[in-house]
Image (cartoon, rainbow, N blue to C red):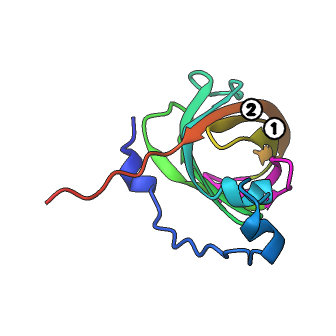
Amino acid sequence: MTNRSTFAAAFVLVSAVAPFSAASAQSPAEPQRPMSQTLDGNYQGTLVCEQMPYAAGPLRAPLDINISGNSVKFARPVFNLDGSRVMGSEIGGGALESDGKLHLVSSWVTNGATAQANYDGVLTAKGGTLTGTQSWVLGGEPHARQCFAAVVKARIEPPTR
């Protein structure tokens, strides 16, 4: 339905290296880092949402998430009602807690509908899941649907020559 590279965004990640104390430098154990530092990077997966009124079926859309420290950004395409054409993007953000919990919010306007979404979930270094609700007003009528997502840490491959 859509080419993932159309929605890929280039993110510059700046990692802060925590200074090591003399005690931790002498210890053979790895120093403890906040979980958010170990989660830095890109995650890719699929967002699946219940069928909305007038749509041909449930939504299945690629989902890209970027973590940098405790900041989270995400994006996914917004399709027309029959899923045949990309009409825009849902782009949002949120925060990552030190235990891997995240909360994301977004709002967008497309095809005469205004929409907003809230998603909550948990990430690990390998991936995670989110659940949330999208609500919108279309033709003066309010609507809402439940959504679920699963993501995995994106593999970064060296460029080929």
Describe the element under mark 1 as helix, strand or loop: strand
In this orientation, which residue lies closer to the viewer: 59 or 4? Answer: 4
Real-space Cα separation, disc 1 to disc 2, in angstroms? 5 Å
- Quarter of the picture holding the C terminus: bottom left
Residue 158 located within the stretch drawn in magenta: no
Q: Residue furthest front?
A: 26
User: Can you identify the residue that label 2 sits on?
Assistant: 147
Residue interval drawn in magenta? 95-114
Kindly tell me whether residue 92 is visible in this rendering. Answer: no
In this orientation, which residue lies closer to the viewer: 135 or 129? Answer: 129
Residue 159: % across, % down: 25, 59
User: Are the residues tagged 1 and 2 within 8 Å (C-beta)?
Assistant: yes
Secondary structure, magenta segment, majority class: strand
Specify the quadrant of the image occupied by residue 90. Answer: bottom right
Q: Residues within 10 Å of mark 1 (few under 14, many from 20)?
A: some
Q: Give me the residue at 81% from left, 50% from top.
A: 102
Specify the quadrant of the image occupied by residue 153. Answer: top right
User: Can you identify the residue that label 1 sits on?
Assistant: 132
Residue type, label 2: Cys
Going from N to C along the chain, the mark reached first, 1 or 2, is 1
Q: Give me the residue at 64% from left, 55% from top.
A: 74
Describe the element under mark 2 as helix, strand or loop: strand
Residue type, label 1: Gly
